[in-house]
Image (cartoon, rainbow, N blue to C red):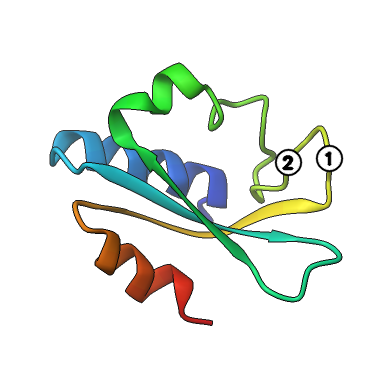
Amino acid sequence: MISMKDKLKRCIEEGKLKNKTYLGVKIMMKGFDRPEVNIHRIEDIDILRIFNDNVYDDNLVLTSFNKIKIIDFICSDSYSEIEEKLAND
C-alpha cells in the first residue's frame, strides 16, 4: 500500500508536470476543533523544503511536533477548487 507521504510527493510531482500553480494542504492540529488549510505556490515547494523526507513521517505527521498532521491535499490553479476540496468540513 502506498503511504500518504508518497501520495503527497506524487501529487506535487504531477502538479509540477501539469504546471499547476498551487498546492493546498489541509492540516489538523491537536487541540483545535477544525482543520486549517494552507496554500503554497508549487514553484516554492523545493525552496520551502517543508515536504522533504525528514519533516513528515509516512502518515504525514510532523516529525518535530506530532500534534500536527496533513490530512488532505490537492494541486490546483484555483483557490476555489482548493476551497471546494479542502475547506469544506
Query: Which SS class for mark 2?
Result: loop
Furthest residue in direction left, as rendered? 18
Relative placement, left or right, of 75 versus 65 is: left
- The one of 49 and 2 positioned closer to us in this rendering: 49
Which percent across, then down, holds residue 15? 24, 42
Q: Is residue 83 visible?
A: yes
Give the numbered dot on residue 62. Answer: 2
**Residue type of the residue flagged with mark 2:** Leu
Relative placement, left or right, of 39 versus 84 is: right
**Residue located at (16% from left, 35% from top):** 17
Furthest residue in direction bottom, as rendered? 89
Furthest residue in direction top, as rendered? 47
Which percent across, then down, holds residue 19? 14, 38
- The one of 82 and 17 positioned closer to us in this rendering: 82
Which percent across, then down, holds residue 70? 61, 54
**Residue located at (44% from left, 49% from top):** 7
Which percent across, then down, holds residue 63? 78, 35
Relative placement, left or right, of 21 versus 34 is: left
- The one of 79 and 16 positioned closer to us in this rendering: 79
Q: Where on the picture, by quarter, is residue 20?
A: top left
74 w.r.t. 22: above or below: below
From the image, tell me which residue sits under label 1: 65
**Contact? badges 1 and 2 (CB < 8 Å):** yes
**Residue type of the residue flagged with mark 1:** Phe
**Residue located at (64% from left, 47% from top):** 60
Q: Is residue 3 visible?
A: no
| Count of numbered labels shown in the rendering | 2
Give the quarter of the figure containing the C terminus: bottom right
